[in-house]
Amino acid sequence: METRYVYAGWLIDGMGGCIQEKVLLTIIEGRWAAVEKRSTAHIPAGGRVTDLSHCTIVPPLIDCCVHMALSGTTDPKQRKQQRTAGYSPVKKMIKRHSADFLSHGVFAVRDCSDKQSMLERFLLEQGTKERAFPVQIITEAENLLSGKQWQVGKQVLDPMEGKLAFWTPLLLALHTLEKEHCYHQDKGNSHNLDDCSFAQQTKQVRLAKNNGIKIALGTNSGMNGILHGESMVEELKLLIKAGYSLSEAIQCATQHNAELLAIDNTLGGIAVGKSAHFLVTRGTPAQLPRKLSYLEAIYMNGKPCKQEYFRKI
């Protein structure tokens, strides 16, 4: 039975807990076995230790609203080509965008595009291979099976109290639409954001927090000017500006999304029993979420992620 130990300078568990300092994590057979204070923990003689005492450890992230078959380009001609593309170019885009997600620590996404049949074909092909595709892609049809109450985009909160389990406000999408004045170019990806300003949406997010409505973080990446992977950092920043702490914002992209998409058996936080997947960011938590764009390392099942996963097609 393989046992590994990790020293972490700081730990954000992704489940809303306070940021922990000087932590020892134990991994047995690729799963978290213990999370302890380093000062009170004991490592057997000869134990295999990875020293990340200069780093912050964060759980893998999840994006619950993406468009895998769109690149985020603002060029109208390219967007038209992408919307009408056949399977071969769509397949290449999915692989390239998966690499973009993984390089920013995003391990799972929910696709909201109109390319569901092509996406299902791609996933079927991947399922026949020996190595599982590193980024878990969830289709709309799969997500409906979770049975969770969920709304994306514009929302009036009063009728939602006590009724809606999750809400995805798409703050970055609104911010980008207003900043670039490109709403008229890409209305198909608006997710009912028309007639709703960024300032109004930010206020709604604060109300949602106070009313106990869980934010499920979605970026709408693939929309005009919103890039896969990179958009996760910006969406987290906007949640923090809206009043969420760093730990709470990360929880929206980990535990909340894992619950919503019914994948909380492996992803959704760092806790005993879950798969030992984690992100390593150099420095203190004060440098997050910016440092998610410059990850020190990515671990899967307690081991460094293979670089082949990051190769772009």
Image (cartoon, rainbow, N blue to C red):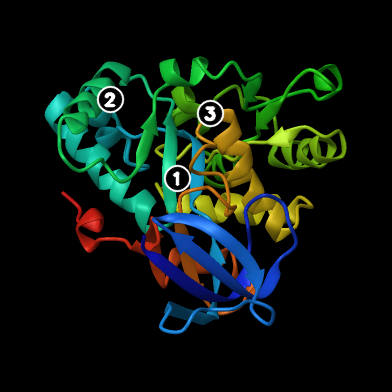
Residue type indicated by callout 2: Leu
Q: Name the residue under label 1.
A: 226
Q: Quadrant of residue 191 in the image?
A: top right
Disc 3, SS: loop
Disc 2, SS: helix
Identity of the residue furthest to the left in this view: 88
Residue type indicated by callout 3: Ala
Q: Nearer the viewer, mark 2 or mark 3?
A: 3
Relative to 136, is 260 on the left or the right?
Answer: right
Q: Nearer the viewer, residue 76 or 142?
A: 142
**Residue 127 horizontal/vertical position (percent):** 21, 30
Q: How far apart are marks 2 and 3 (CA)?
A: 19 Å
Q: How far apart are marks 3 and 1 (CA)?
A: 26 Å
**Residue 94 horizontal/vertical position (percent):** 26, 38
Local crowd size for mark 1, using a 10 Å CA cut-off: few (<14), some (14–19), many (≥20): many
Q: Nearer the viewer, mark 3 or mark 1?
A: 3
| Badge 1 vs badge 2, beta-carbon distance below 8 Å | no
In this picture, is 102 found above or below 82?
below
First of labels 1, 2 by sequence position? 2
Q: Which residue is drawn at 51% across and 47% down?
A: 274
Q: Name the residue under label 2.
A: 119
**Residue 74 horizontal/vertical position (percent):** 37, 42
Q: Residue at x 12, y 30 (%)?
A: 88
Q: Which residue is drawn at 27% across and 16% down?
A: 117
| Badge 3 vs badge 1, beta-carbon distance below 8 Å | no
Disc 1, SS: loop
Q: Which residue is drawn at 54% across and 48% down?
A: 273
Q: Quadrant of residue 159 in the image?
A: top right
Residue type indicated by callout 1: Ile
Q: Name the residue under label 3.
A: 262
